[in-house]
Amino acid sequence: MNVHHLKTDILILGAGGAGLFAALHALKANPDLDITIVSKGLLGKCGCTRMVQGGYNVALNPGDSIERHFMDTIEGGKWLPHQELAWTLVTKAIERVQELENEIGCFFDRNPDGTLHGKAFAGQTFDRTVHKGDLTGIEIINRLMEQVWARPIRRLEEHRAVALIPAKDGALSGVLLIDVRTGEFRFVAAQAVLLATGGGPTMYRYHTPSGDKSMDGLAMALRLGLPLRDMEMVQFHPTGLLAGPDTRMTGTVLEEGLRGSGGHLLNGAMHRFMGDYDPKLERATRDVVSRAIFAEMRAGRTTRNGGVYIKMSHLGPAKVAKEFKGMVDRCRDCGFDLAGGLVEVVPTAHYFMGGVVCEVDTATERFGLFVAGEDASGMHGANRLGGNGVANSTVFGGIAGDVMPRWIAANSGHRDPDTNVLDAELARAQLPFAQIQKPGDLNALREKLLDTMWDEVGVVRDRASIARGLAALDRIEAELLATGVADAPDADRRFNLTWHDWLNLRSLCEVSRVIALAALKRENSRGAHFRSDFPEPGDFATSTFTVARQGANGIEIGEQPVQFTHVKPGETLLRDALAAE
Ligand SMILES: Cc1cc2nc3c(=O)[nH]c(=O)nc-3n(C[C@H](O)[C@H](O)[C@H](O)COP(=O)(O)OP(=O)(O)OC[C@H]3O[C@@H](n4cnc5c(N)ncnc54)[C@H](O)[C@@H]3O)c2cc1C
C-alpha cells in the first residue's frame, strides 16, 4: 500500500471553532511555522460550530460577572466540572468574543444603545447569550473561514484522520489520514498535533450533530491509551424536531432560546406538564426538561409522532417570526407553523461532555498531543449550559494555538513513527476490503446501534438496561467486523462512502461501549446521567468523576475525586463578589 508522506510543524485535526481558532492563533504566535488543518468535510461547511443557533455565553454586561457565569456553569454541571477549566472558559470568553468582533469580523446583534444583546438561555441566572439572530454559528464559522483562507495555512479538506501514531518512545509522531477523494493514505508527521474533531453523540436514535461526526477523535484517543473523562455524560437537548421517521430533519434541534423566551411545552393531552416536574418550568436545565419529556413519552401522553409539542404563539406570532426566523423557516420547511401553531419535539442527543483529559493549556498526557473543543472534557461536568459549547471550542482552540508554538520552541523536532503501529493501523482501516464475506447491510446495523443506545443507555438508564446495551453492542460490532464493502478487495476507493460508513460505525461502536461502561460505573444521578436504580445525586462534597482507559484486558473505568479549587459545594462566589464591592 502506497502511503503519501507529508511533514508539518502543527497539525490540526478538525475545522470547527476550536481548529480554526487554533490555526489563526498559532500562525500569529509564530508566522514561520508550517500549519496544516485537516477536515473530514469542506472547510467552513462541516462540523457543529456552523450549526450553532442560540449563541455564545459571555459575561459582558455590567450587571453580570464572571463569578456569576462560573457559578451557573458549576451548578449546572452538578459540581463535577474541573474548576480551573471552567474558570478559564468563563474568563477567556470575554476576550474571545471581543476578538470575534474586532479581529475576525463577526457582527452580533446589538441593543439600541450599541451594546451586545444577550438572550435568555435556560439554566442561567443572567441573559448573557450573545448571538446573531438564531443562526450564530454561520456568522462565526464563515468569518473564521475567510480569515484562514487569507493566510498561508495548508488545508487538507475531505481528509479523514484514522489513527494517532506514536513514535517508539511513546511521544506523538503524527497522524494517519485517508484522502476521501482518492481513497489513498497519507501520513503527516508533525511536531505538535491538536485533536479538535468535535465529539458529537450521533449513536442515538435522535441526534443533532452534523453528519461528519462519528466520534473518531475519541476512538483514536482511546486506542492510543489516553484517559477519557465523564464518558457517561451525554447531553440530550429537549427540543429536537420530530417530523416523522422518513426525514433526516427529525432530531435536528430547535434552539434553547424558544424555551428561554417563554415557550410552553404541552403533552399530547394539551397539558403544560413542566410544572409537574420542576418549579423553573420550561427554563429548567436541559437534563431536567429532557427527562420530563421522556417521562411523558413513557406514560404514553404523546403527540401523533410520539413526542410532545412546543407552543410559541402566545408570545405573538409576529414577534416569534422576527426573533426566531431560522427556526420558523426550518419548521415551515417540514410543514409546521412554529410562530402560530404547534410543533412536535422530542429529546435529541446533542453534545458530549465526556472527552480527553487535558490541562488548562490543552496539553494531554501524550507528549506532543493537545486537545480542544468538544473532544476535550472537564469544562462542563454533568451538564453543559446552552451557549457554553461554542465558547468552549473558541476559548480553548485559541489557547492551543498560543501554546503549541511555545511548546515546539522548547521541544523542537519531528519524531519517527513506530512502524509497527502504523502498519497495524493501515491494516485496521482497510479491514472491510479484506473481508471474504458478502457485503452486509450497514444501514440496518446503524439502525440497531441507534435504537440500542436510545433505548438502553439513553435519557434514563439502569443496570439491567446498560447490560442489555453492552450485549447488543457486542453483537453489532461482531456483525460489523464480519461485513465487507462491495467488490472487495478491488473496490474503487475514491469517495467510497460505504467504506467511510463502515469506519464511522466502528468509531461509534467503540465509543458507545465506553459510554455504557462509564454509565454502569456511576451509581448516582447527576445532570445528564440519570440512573433510575440510583436516582439520588449523592454527596456533592465527595463528588468523583469517571476516567476510562483502554487496558490490556479491555476498557477500565476508574473514579477520581473532583478538586474544588475555587468553590466548594454549599458555597458561592457571588457572596464573596458582593462583599468585595
Ligand atoms: C444543532 C446544534 C446547535 C448548537 N447550538 C449551540 C449554541 O447555540 N451554543 C453553543 O454554545 N453551542 C451550540 N452547539 C454546540 C457547538 O456547536 C459545539 O460544541 C462546538 O461548535 C464544537 O466545536 P468543535 O470545534 O469542537 O467541533 P466542530 O465545530 O464540530 O468541528 C469538528 C471538525 O472536525 C472534523 N472531523 C471530525 N472527524 C474527523 C476526522 N476523523 N478527521 C478529520 N476531521 C474530522 C469535522 O469535519 C469538523 O471540521 C450546537 C450544536 C449543534 C449540533
Image (cartoon, rainbow, N blue to C red):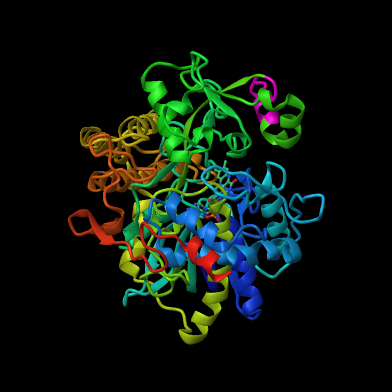
In the displayed structure image, the side of residue 65 where residue 223 appears, left or right:
left
Q: Residue at x 68, y 54 (%)?
A: 140
Q: Nearer the viewer, residue 562 or 19?
A: 562
The magenta-colored residue range is 328-340
In the displayed structure image, the side of residue 461 where residue 369 appears, left or right:
right
Q: Residue at x 69, y 57 (%)?
A: 145
Q: How many marks?
A: 0
In the displayed structure image, the side of residue 194 where residue 131 appears, left or right:
right
- Does the magenta run of residues contain 338? yes
**x, y percentage for residue 232?**
33, 47
Q: Quadrant of residue 341?
A: top right
**x, y percentage for residue 245?**
50, 21
Asked whether residue 38 is in view, the answer is no
- Location of residue 254 with respect to 295 vertically, above or below: below
In the displayed structure image, the side of residue 358 where residue 89 appears, left or right:
right
**x, y percentage for residue 109?**
75, 49
